[in-house]
Image (cartoon, grey):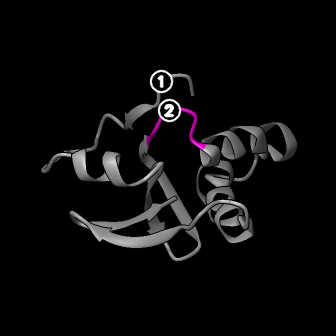
């Protein structure tokens, strides 16, 4: 949160720079399915409002028994409920869909 940055799972192969995403968007997260994000790629700016909402969702609605609920479905739920952030968009980048806030 304090510095922002990039998180990648160990099995992610990066084939192009993230510079454009870092400059244009406060937060970029991979998208696995229509109703599920994929936390294997997370690129967020310093003090990203979305990242704060996502972290707080673990306090309010953590479901350890449901595979990828907090890392996948909650992200989509938060995106759908955001009204005070300027925008969010779904773009195609590299080989998959990326949710951008």
On-image quarter of the N terminus = top right
- Tags 2 and 1 touching, CB below 8 Å: yes
Residue 64 visible from this viewpoint = no
Mark 2: secondary structure: loop
What label does residue 46 carry, if any? 2
Q: Residue at horizontal 55%, vertical 22%?
A: 2
x and y percentages locating residue 67 in the rendered image: 64, 52
Q: Residue furthest left?
A: 15
In the picture of the structure, the residue carrying the numbered disc 1 is 3
Front-lying residue, 92 or 72: 92
Is 31 in front, or is 67? 31
Quarter of image, res 52? top right
Name the residue: 78% across, 47% down.
63
- Relative placement, left or right, of 58 versus 69 is right
User: In the picture shown, does residue 4 fall above or below 68?
Assistant: above
Q: Secondary structure at mark 1?
A: loop
Q: Is residue 44 visible?
A: yes
User: Looking at the image, which residue sits at the far bottom?
Assistant: 34
Above/below status of 56 relative to 1: below
Magenta residues (range): 44-48
């Amino acid at each position: 949160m304090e510095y922002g940055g990039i998180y990648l799972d160990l099995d992610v192969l990066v084939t192009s720079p993230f510079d454009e995403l870092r400059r244009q968007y406060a937060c970029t997260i991979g998208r696995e399915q229509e109703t599920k994000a994929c936390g294997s790629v997370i690129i967020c700016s310093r003090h990203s409002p979305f990242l704060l909402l996502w972290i707080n969702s673990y306090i309010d609605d953590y479901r350890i028994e449901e595979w990828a609920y907090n890392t996948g479905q909650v992200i989509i739920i938060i995106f759908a409920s955001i009204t005070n952030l300027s925008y969010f968009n779904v773009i195609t980048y590299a080989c998959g869909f990326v949710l951008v806030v």
